[in-house]
Image (cartoon, rainbow, N blue to C red):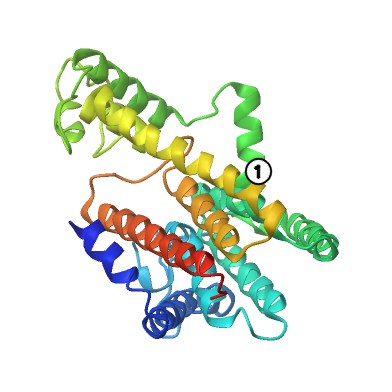
Amino acid sequence: MLFLIIYNFINLKEIKFLKFFSLSFLVIYNFLTLDAFKEIYFGSNFFGYFTNHPFRHSGLFGDELILGSFLQKFYSVFLISFYICFNKVKNFSVYLFINILIIFFVIQSTGERSAFYLFIFNNLLLIFLIRRKYIIILISTILILAFATFLNLEKNNNIKRYFINPIISTFTGNIISTEYNELFRVSFNMFLDKKIIGYGPKQFRIICKKEKYYKNKNSCSTHPHNFYVQILAETGIVGFLILLTIYIINFKKYFQNLLLYNKDKSEYHLISIVIYSGLSMLIFPFTTTGNIFNNWLSYLIYFIFAYSYGIIDIFKFYNNEKKNF
């Protein structure tokens, strides 16, 4: 129901409303980013608050360490909104690049590895949209930032968490932490006991306490920290195949639009590439995640999917009318 409401609301094809919505979103998104940026580099945010956690920052989210995840999940919405509001502004690419760099710094500083990796992967999927003359500038900037960051490695604990520790873990055979290994094992055993429809939404935290599954404190939690593993345990193969199908369709659409954009350079295919790459990252299988049945996370996912499909339909309409947005 929420999906349909948001989809129909976005799909009104009213340019003034869409630009107002996009501008409002940019104000909120940029305020969250700049607020965290101030906390990172000046010790506290605009309201004098600072995150009470070493090497982590969360801005207005306080002790809820979800800022990086929030910025990453809404990244495609940010790109679309920025395009809708400013695509005709001179030096549009420069302003967008500066914004992306700030978002990169903030996500890196939140200490959320999954958000950081997905943000990088998302931008790698979009690198094909960059004009050739800007690619050299982009690569040079990345190399300079990487060099400057590693020079400060001893003071930057997050770099160790992102790069050094995973490399060490790979060679020692512990690619995923022991805690998550246990949760995944329990989830799979739960799936084997109820293969078709699982134990039901939000049941992992209850079932994992049973003697049959509980081994130690690492084998039980509120959720198994991966959408697909959780869906497998709680909704069985039926729910798992639905989620996997949604992911495959969106990732396939990304490649289809990428090929079409290389041929016609249309605005519709450009927007579709950004949208489908973002949706693919939203439900990416190979990363740690929150609880897919958590209310705020569910609403967030529904909103982004509804917004994304609504935007695609709007640009498809203008493409069929042979108009630019």
> How many labels sit on residues?
1
For the view shown, which residue lies furthest in the front direction?
321
Residue 167 sits above or below residue 320 on the image:
above
Task: Name the residue at 44% across, 85% down.
Answer: 46
84 or 199, which lies in front?
84
Quadrant in the picture for the N terminus: bottom left
Q: Which residue is mark 1?
A: 163
Horizontal and vertical percent position of residue 321? 50, 70
Horizontal and vertical percent position of residue 98? 67, 75
Task: Name the residue at 29% across, 54% down.
Answer: 297
- Dot 1: what SS? helix
Residue 218 visible in the picture: no
Q: Indicate the amino acid at tag 1.
A: Phe
Horizontal and vertical percent position of residue 236? 24, 24
112 or 230, which lies in front?
230
Residue 132 sits above or below residue 277 on the image:
below
Describe residue 192's horizontal placement relative to residue 157 as left or right.
Answer: left
Snapshot quadrant of residue 145:
bottom right
Horizontal and vertical percent position of residue 228? 36, 33
Residue 150 visible in the picture: yes
Task: Name the residue at 21% across, 29% down.
Answer: 235
Residue 52 sits above or below residue 221 on the image:
below
Snapshot quadrant of residue 194:
top left
Q: Dot 1: few (<14), some (14–19), or many (≥20) neighbours within 10 Å?
A: few
Snapshot quadrant of residue 63:
bottom left
295 or 253, which lies in front?
253
Describe residue 284's horizontal placement relative to residue 143 as left or right.
Answer: left
Describe residue 188's horizontal placement relative to residue 313 as left or right.
Answer: left
